């Protein structure tokens, strides 16, 4: 019974993760590029979260890491923090909040494809059809970029690379979750990720050119939300979910993001705390989103039913 309670909690944790992310797509868009460049925003996000992870870990978790596993954590940091964050924020800066949410929903399909090669999952006709459907919908969505207000071909390409990078991270981090505490793993992953972002040449240059005196208080609130809510809590909750659920199940919750992004776009617009991004919601994009949802369901058949 204890395991089933933990598994239920893991499902709840993953839903909370995507709720926090759904709001982030809308709120973070309002910070860039007027107040912070994507590189500076990423530095703030990773630095703040790394400090919080080490503080919490020092009180609750004390365990030694094998040297060979530190290398794997560094590799996870490349895909789960450095590449993932850089391409997400640059993509969000160029494209629309709605597009970023839709592109994240292809993550389960990417995880399934990677699992076929890395974890040796079985290929079935249904899953193969789901992969083809999801890939086709993603390509069509990318081809529509630049045709509407707030869309960008380059931005959508960056968002797709972000989704691929995060999928690699989810698959690679799973073995570490079996061996160590999620907090230990994520603390080291973010520590290595911070080092990678600091050595990225434009980061410190953009930081030196940032005028912090013009940033209003409501923008600082958004930045703090991204650091604490969308980085610290989401990564902890994701690691908790990965400990009790498969990477495919964990990533399948991402298909809630487009719906949540649309809901938050309308909610925050009416609350007056975000600009109007609802004009980027079209029937064509909705059709591609629903196609991706169906593809996610098909590619996850068997895996979700077995593990849920």
Image (cartoon, rainbow, N blue to C red):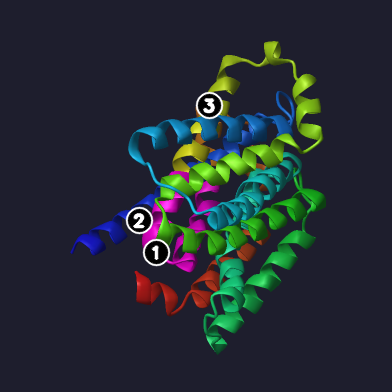
| Main secondary structure of the magenta stretch | helix
Circles 1 and 2: CB atoms closer than 8 Å: yes
Q: Which mark is residue 50?
A: none
Q: Which residue is mark 3?
A: 224
Tell me where residue 214 sits by quadrant. Answer: top right
Q: Which residue is mark 2?
A: 10
Give the crowd class for mark 2: few <14, some 14-19, many >=20 residues within 10 Å: many
Which of the two residues, 232 or 193, is positioned nearer the viewer here? 193
Q: In the image, is residue 251 part of the stretch drawn in magenta?
A: yes
Tell me the residue at 50%/42% (across/down). 187
Q: Helix or strand or loop: what does disc 2 sit on?
A: helix
Nearer-N-terminus badge (1/2): 2
Q: Which residues fall within the magenta stretch?
A: 235-263
Give the crowd class for mark 3: few <14, some 14-19, many >=20 residues within 10 Å: some
Tell me the residue at 51%/30% (across/down). 51
Tell me the residue at 58%/27% (across/down). 223
Nearer-N-terminus badge (3/1): 3
Give the crowd class for mark 1: few <14, some 14-19, many >=20 residues within 10 Å: many
Indicate whether 130 appears above or below 146.
Answer: below
The answer, for residue 73, to whether it is visible in the render is yes
Q: Which residue is mark 1?
A: 245
Residue furthest bottom as drawn: 125
């Amino acid at each position: 019974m204890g395991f089933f309670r933990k598994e239920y909690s893991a499902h709840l944790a993953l839903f909370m993760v995507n709720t926090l992310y759904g709001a982030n797509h809308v709120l973070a868009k309002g910070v860039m590029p007027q107040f912070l460049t994507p590189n500076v925003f990423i530095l703030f996000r990773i630095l703040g979260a790394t400090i919080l992870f080490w503080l919490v870990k020092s009180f609750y978790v004390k365990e030694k890491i094998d040297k060979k596993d530190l290398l794997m954590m560094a590799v996870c940091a490349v895909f789960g923090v450095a590449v993932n964050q850089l391409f997400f924020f640059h993509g969000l800066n160029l494209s629309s909040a709605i597009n970023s949410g839709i592109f994240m929903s292809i993550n389960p399909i990417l995880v399934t494809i990677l699992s076929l090669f890395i974890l040796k999952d079985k290929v079935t006709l249904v899953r193969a059809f789901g992969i083809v459907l999801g890939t086709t919908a993603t390509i069509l969505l990318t081809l529509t970029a630049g045709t509407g207000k707030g869309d960008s071909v380059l931005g959508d390409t960056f968002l797709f690379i972000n989704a691929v990078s995060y999928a690699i991270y989810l698959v690679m981090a799973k073995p570490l979750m079996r061996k160590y505490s999620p907090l230990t793993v994520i603390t080291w992953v973010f520590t290595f990720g911070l080092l990678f972002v600091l050595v990225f040449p434009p980061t410190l240059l953009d930081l030196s050119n940032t005028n912090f005196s013009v940033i209003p208080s409501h923008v600082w609130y958004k930045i703090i939300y991204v650091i604490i809510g969308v980085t610290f809590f989401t990564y902890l909750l994701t690691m908790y979910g990965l400990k009790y659920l498969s990477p495919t199940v964990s990533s399948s919750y991402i298909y809630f993001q487009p719906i949540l992004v649309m809901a938050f776009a309308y909610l925050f617009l009416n609350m007056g705390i975000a600009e109007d991004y609802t004009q980027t919601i079209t029937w064509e994009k909705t059709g591609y989103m629903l196609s991706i949802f169906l593809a996610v369901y098909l590619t996850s058949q068997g895996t979700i039913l077995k593990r849920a």
